[in-house]
Image (spheres, rainbow, N blue to C red):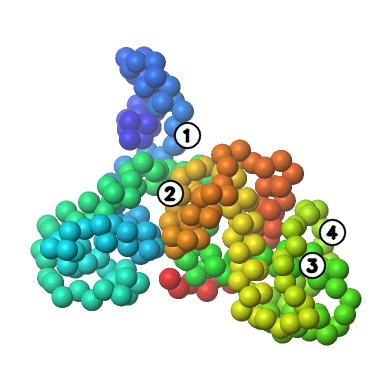
Amino acid sequence: MLRVLINRYHSKEGHALLKFLPEEERQSVMDQEVSSMDLTPILEQPQKALAKIHYSWIQPLEEAFPDSLRPALIAALTAQKLAGLKEPSALSISEVARKFILNQIYDSLKIDEHLPLEYLPQGELLPLAQWSRGDMIHLMDFLGLYDLASEVRQIVNRNYLKNIYACLTPKQFYYLKVCLHQKERLTSPKLGIDPTQQDCPKLKKIIHRRGLLRLGRALCGEHPDLVWHIAHTLDRGRGNVLLQEYHTEPLHKVTQLLKEQVLNLVNSLPLKGGA
């Protein structure tokens, strides 16, 4: 916030003002890469961030609330969050009470420890933070096809290939062929599938999981708050995997390649929307 205020009111002599702070605090302000002069994002952060966060991150908080207060918490949530929690709201609360409860959720999720999206450094993967959960899942389903392509290259039996192709949508099949025509620059572990069997649920689950792992490694080296926002748009299971795969530094000879794959899909996939 201090950095934004300096940008807004003391853009020329801001660094001179910092000399009055202790060294550690002065360095902390100088390390902020925020160039915005707009105070609105940080003021709107509680409302906007909570609206974007998947309900599964709120579920443990709801379960930890005393039974007597849980109806009030449920009444404070939006209809979309309630649909996910499968908790009908049978209580009407005032706007003051609603804001108080939402602030408790905001504090419990430690959202204030993360920069608003508007303050994050510009980057090619920044738009992902605006995507819906449905779009992110769609992206992972296609990103995992790079792993499938590595497996398909080793299969010559046409019946085995038919078992695999039958599990793909027409658009996935088309993109798989695109992947097959690209030179493989990353060695992927075996998928662990049996091509003699047509087990579509298992294959789709594996492809999706591989896409999630690729995305996590593609985000390595990005601003940690960007990864936090993306992870919390997803459900808690996928989001935690993404956070576990993330490293503050790019992975040598891996991250840049995976980032290119993500960007190829970002530029070619139609957004589906949805929760």
Left or right: residue 214 versus residue 29 is right
**Is residue 14 positioned above or below 257 on the image?**
above
Quick one: label 3 or label 4, which is nearer the N terminus?
3
- Image location of residue 133, percent across then percent down: 47, 66
Q: Amino acid at mark 2?
A: Leu
- Residue identifier under label 4: 183
Mark 4 and mark 2 in contact? Answer it, CB < 8 Å: no
Give the quarter of the figure containing the C terminus.
Answer: bottom left
- Image location of residue 23, percent across then percent down: 39, 15
- Image location of residue 57, percent across then percent down: 37, 59
Q: Which circle, 3 or 1, is nearer the viewer?
A: 3
Q: Which circle, 3 or 2, is nearer the viewer?
A: 3
Residue at mark 1 to residue at mark 4: CA–CA distance: 37 Å
Residue at mark 1 to residue at mark 2: CA–CA distance: 13 Å
**Is residue 144 positioned above or below 251 on the image?**
below
Between residue 183 and residue 213, name the one nearer to us.
213
Q: Which circle, 4 or 2, is nearer the viewer?
A: 4
Residue at the image point whose x is 68% and y is 53% from the top: 258
Quick one: label 3 or label 1, which is nearer the N terminus?
1
Quick one: label 3 or label 2, which is nearer the N terminus?
2
Query: Residue 33 got which mark?
Result: 1
- Residue identifier under label 3: 151
Residue at mark 3 to residue at mark 1: CA–CA distance: 43 Å
Quick one: label 1 or label 4, which is nearer the N terminus?
1
Q: Which circle, 1 or 4, is nearer the viewer?
A: 4
Residue at mark 3 to residue at mark 2: CA–CA distance: 38 Å
Mark 3 and mark 1 in contact? Answer it, CB < 8 Å: no
Q: Amino acid at mark 4?
A: Lys
Residue at the image point whose x is 62% and y is 50% from the top: 217
- Residue identifier under label 2: 117
Q: Amino acid at mark 1?
A: Glu
Q: Amino acid at mark 3?
A: Glu
